[in-house]
Image: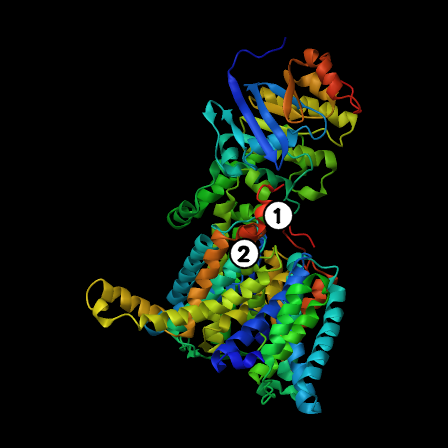
Amino acid sequence: MLYQQLINGLMLGASYSLVAIGYTLIFGVLNLLYFAHGEVFMIGAFVGLYMVTLGGANIYVALLGAMLASALVGVIAVYISVRPVSKDHPLAPLISTIGLTIVIQNLAIYIFGGQQVAFPDTISDTLYHIGPITISSVQIFILTVAVVLMALLWLFIERTKMGRAIRATAENHETAALLGVDVNRVVLMTFIIGSGIAGIAGVLDGIKNSGISPFMGIGAAVKGLIVMLLGGLGNVFGAMVAGLLLGMIEILTSAYIGTTQRDFFSFAILILILLYKPTGLFGTRTTEQR
Amino acid sequence: MREIVTSGVCLAIEGLTKRFGGFYALNDLSMEVAQGAIHGLIGPNGAGKTTFFNLLTGVLPPDSGKIVFEGEVVDDTRPSKRTVRGIARTFQNIRLFPHLTVLESVMIGEHCRVFPSVWKAFGKAVFQLPFHEAAEERQMRATALELLEFLGLADKHDHKASDLPYGEQRKLEMARALATQPKLLLLDEPAAGMNPHETEELDDIITRIRDRGTTVILVEHDMRLVMGICDRVTVINFGTKIADGPPEQIQNDPVVIEAYLGEDVEL
Amino acid sequence: MLDSLFDGYTRSLLIFAGINVISAYSFYLPYKTGQVSLGQAGFMAVGAYASAVMTQKFGMPFAASLVVAGVIAGVVGVAVGFPALRIKGVYLLLLTLGFSEIIGVIALSWGYIGGAQGFPNISFNPFSLDYVTGLVIVLIFFFARLERSSLIAGLAGALFAHQATYLDSSTFGIMVSVEILMFVIVGGGSTYWGPFVGAVVLNAIPEILRSLHDWLELVPVSWTNYYPMNRIYDFLHSFLDFENAKRLIAFGLILIVMMIIKPDGLVTRDSLRHALRPLQFWRWKVRRA
């Protein structure tokens, strides 16, 4: 039973991690709480859904399409709500991206309707029994995609020029700019990567819950924020681990304490971390001071 | 006179002015820096030296005046473009990337020479095999290690930048700036907080940087260092130039001596 | 008193606008000392539920419950504010957000105040407009002396409860806090007129879009029979259609454009000076330092 719950926790946590990665990347390079990230996640889910239902695509093509569409939303976000907005007003980018959140969410309601839509079964559901654990092929698929994605991102961040530039910009964007790092370019790339991953997370979430709605973004955004903080602001590795951790905590509380208390615990963790360990579990990687 | 006449003018400043409210941080400053020179820029605290660097690197826009670098007027608004042009700097209060390793920090400096645009990067990722990236990385790594060797930091290349002792952090800043392959290097008080032995070493490093063909502008309070290695010294006070000439002449200039009255500095 | 001046629709518009002004000031108080809160909706929820419980479960009159609601929200504010003192910037933003979400979870899970079913049938207060007007006037003129932002948010919440007559855990979600923040930023945080103007304008925009649609109906049909007027008419007609999603899209776009062209907000010292210039002819010669 416990193992079973841990698997469920990993499943939930994987999508938290994927959303939080984008958050923490973007927070790192811009020191911006990018609220629209949850909506990007939602757009990814819808693009995936329509590629499967209308386009008849298989799930891998749908994942790729969702990733590209979400990345495009990220690019649009940069060009309309980040670049033109003055950096001298600390809250201006926050408000403009909130405006974008409102626009995207209501566009989605307008286009897709305000109801929950069922996500089609694209993977044949077989159950595997490994010792005491029962795991379905859907679960294996979701976990595999999430793990592969995180591993690739990890390699990208640690081993490539762009990844290094992103890390340097997160630590001190002024100094990075003075060393010739084109910060605008890094910010754009960060949005593309973060948004693409969030789009895939949206599809995975749709598969897992077998339903999506235009309102799924806000919840994901708030959980993403908690995970980002838990892992340490700007710390990509931290976001990965913290997402899995929060997923397990939530599943365990809802299994052994109660479903309504689940969110209470998440927010209690948020507040405790803020008060006693604001650098998160793995340390911050930004210039933001407490 | 140790005037370098073999080469032309690296940097020419004409009537540079910067106001903050009613306060003139720089007022109609004009000067020339010869190619391949070590040019000292001194002045009492608050004379406008830091503002000067900020204008040169594009962090702040000037209110009026021209910056001519290598014969071209520099008016890019983004600091990273200035770096690409060949102007690099170090900071008075050290600004490292604490969680990057020494080697990575230096490699960041090389980015402006090898970095493709986002769209090109995607093109590369899609159309070229991954070993191209790997080869480029190897090349960058080798260059970075060479630079670290040059500054005597090679054996610490895998340390975290924040773990280095103070003097080596200063050297790392220089290595990082040199990695951008600058034609002009701005050093902002590199000797601050260094012991006499380290300062001596610094003397040697700056000379060797010049010998690599990089023009150096040195802002420094340590007059022994300035007078010892600079080919020419400009003195500013309250944002205006009050003297300009070879070190021997500056040391005996009554205007300069007066400007420094009350400051604990030995000219 | 004031209620008789307006018809029901206008009255409720004014009341909700007034509640928004009050909540905007509750955000503005800590904001002007540099603390940005995303938890004002949480304090509103505390006030709203407190007042609802007082009137419905204990039979308290509205005026008294309003005071109690304010005090309870104020006390909660002290409890939250104390640890929040050592926190700044984005961390405070997250802390207040977390607080407000916790209030939401409590509202959802506590059966006594309705839980998931919500708190229905709260007595309607027919004099809300008087209360709201009075409070707004007090806030504008005695603003500098006020201390407890959570108390003010609690009052706004209590007024809301007795106007909407129904509460549930989603009434004061994160978007409410976000809206409150937007009132102040859009209005302008540098003067104390900003929150007022911001709340009024942002409340008015959806109404203006709606009335533009109504006015469009007044265009004579003969004008719109031919190209290109027919196309323009059709576009405007569908764009301004009274549909929530579309109006909110326009609203979001306005916010983005606003942040690009006027990130200081609508009301700044300069714009105030321009607006008041005719009244200050004796100061024309005075230049800005």
Residue type at mark 2: give it: Gly
Of residues A97 and C158, the one nearer the viewer is C158
Residue A202 point in image, percent of width and height: 47, 68
Subunit bearing disc 1: A
A60 sits left or right of C220 in the view = right
Mark 2 → mark 1, Cα distance in angstroms: 30 Å
Residue C174 point in image, percent of width and height: 58, 70
Disc assigned to residue C265: 2
In the rendered image, the vertical position of residue A287 relative to residue C79, given as above or below: above
Residue type at mark 1: give it: Glu
Q: Is residue B179 visible?
A: yes
Disc assigned to residue A171: 1
Element class at badge 1: helix
The single residue placed furthest to the left in the displayed view is: C226
Question: Can you say which quadrant of the picture contains the C terminus of chain C?
Answer: top right
Q: Is residue A1 visible?
A: no
